[in-house]
Image: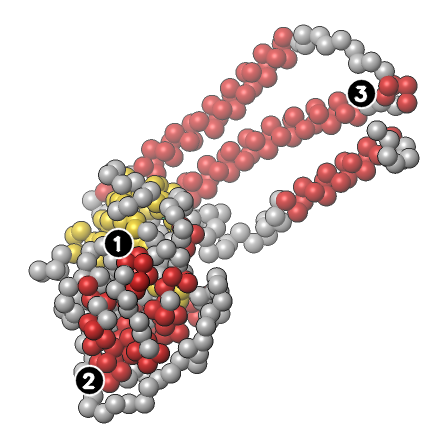
Amino acid sequence: MRLLKIPAKSRSWAARALALACILPVSGCEWLHMDGHQSAMDAEGPVALAQLKLFYVTCWVTLVIFILVGSVFAYAIFKFRARSEAEEAAIPAARGHGNPFVEMGLIGGSILALVFIAFPTLKDILYTYDVPAAEKANSYQVVAIGYQWWFKFEYPNEQIPGAGVVTTANELVIPAGRAVHIDLRSIDVMHSFWVPKLAGKVDMIPNRANFLWLEADHPGYYWGQCAEFCGDSHALMRFRVIALDDKDFSEWLAQQKLPAREVAASGTQAPKAQFASLRTFQTNEIGFADDQLNVSPLDAWRAKQFPEKNEDPALIAQGKALFQAKTCFTCHVVRGSQLGGSPLYPDLTHVGARTTIAGGVLENTPEMVQRWIHNPGAVKPGNKMWVNGYLLNHIQLTPDEEVALVAYIESLK
Ligand code: CUA
């Protein structure tokens, strides 16, 4: 079909230029900055590094194949192109069988390429499977459990007398420079555990004892993500890994073993600290301030371990009473301070010391905690706090009650 009166020669070159122009934007042009929060190209531990190196081996092999095949293809296009109108209209020559040596060579070459990739692949499958024998004795044990849509982390060797083991949510704190074996469990549907800079992904499957291991080369703050579609809010099921040196890690463990922090109520009712807002939030509005957590997340995490500077004891006492009155305690454990709680929901004993809430989608600031308890369903559609808690139990909070509850939650360091 001749829609345009362009000579055949120019047309074919124009088509090639167009094809190239289309490839460039598709490639993403991300080559210059590959150190994003969840970039697997920026490995910071031995497991992720092994996975990254294997990826590069595959890339180089396929690049060589691409260049070889592409060159032959380009040569054929150039050599056998139609040079005139007559050649373009000519009937193609009958197909021959081809050259058996070339065909056997291609089969042999493909097998070689696969074998070349298979050796490092098998080596890394064995290496990334579990903690290397030499490091086993010094390794640390954690259990990660997937829920719709948040992560629970248990420390099976860190007993709290009469209260089970150290348990936290959405933020996995580990010792840096030490192999960590993580048992992966799921309470409901399939999830997947992935910390791109450290290791992954391995699925968390109900009734199946999966596990992985990882190690952080140095203290740091790492972003993690559920990597298996698990329902409405799958994309909002995130977590963090905080790697600490030995001293910080044992201090953190000691703090986690303590019961919930109590703030002595002062006699006078101080003026209520209103948030700048009590504003409404847009759907999918980002839940992070452009601040310390972006610039220096580990320092931001450290700062969260200490009581807030301007806390209001009277407001906190009011929030603590509301935690009972509004039946929050029936689901959430606040150890030593509130009655009840269930292992099916996030343990809030030290929630104020985390940098994120709501499955890692909101920064743990008073404004964001208020946003969450004001309307959990708007932040994370389908979540159980909204469906099984607020809706089922007709829980309603006035703005003042929200402010008091937020003050209490933030005080739980
Ligand atoms: Cu859990 Cu996706």
> What residue is shown with label 1?
153
Label 2's element? loop
Q: From what the image shows, is residue 22 above or below residue 357?
A: above
Q: Residue at x 56, y 31 (%)?
A: 62
Residue at mark 2 to residue at mark 3: CA–CA distance: 89 Å
Residue 309 seen in the current view: no
Q: Amino acid at mark 1?
A: Phe
Q: From what the image shows, is residue 352 above or below residue 207?
A: below
Residue at mark 3 to residue at mark 1: CA–CA distance: 64 Å
Tag 1 or tag 3, which sits nearer the N-term? 3
Q: Amino acid at mark 3?
A: Phe
Tag 3 or tag 2, which sits nearer the N-term? 3
- Which of discs 2 and 3 lies nearer the camera? The answer is 2
> What residue is shown with label 2?
265
Q: Where's residue 125, x and y in %?
A: 36, 33
Residue at mark 2 to residue at mark 1: CA–CA distance: 32 Å
Label 3 close to label 1 by CB (< 8 Å): no
Q: Amino acid at mark 2?
A: Ala
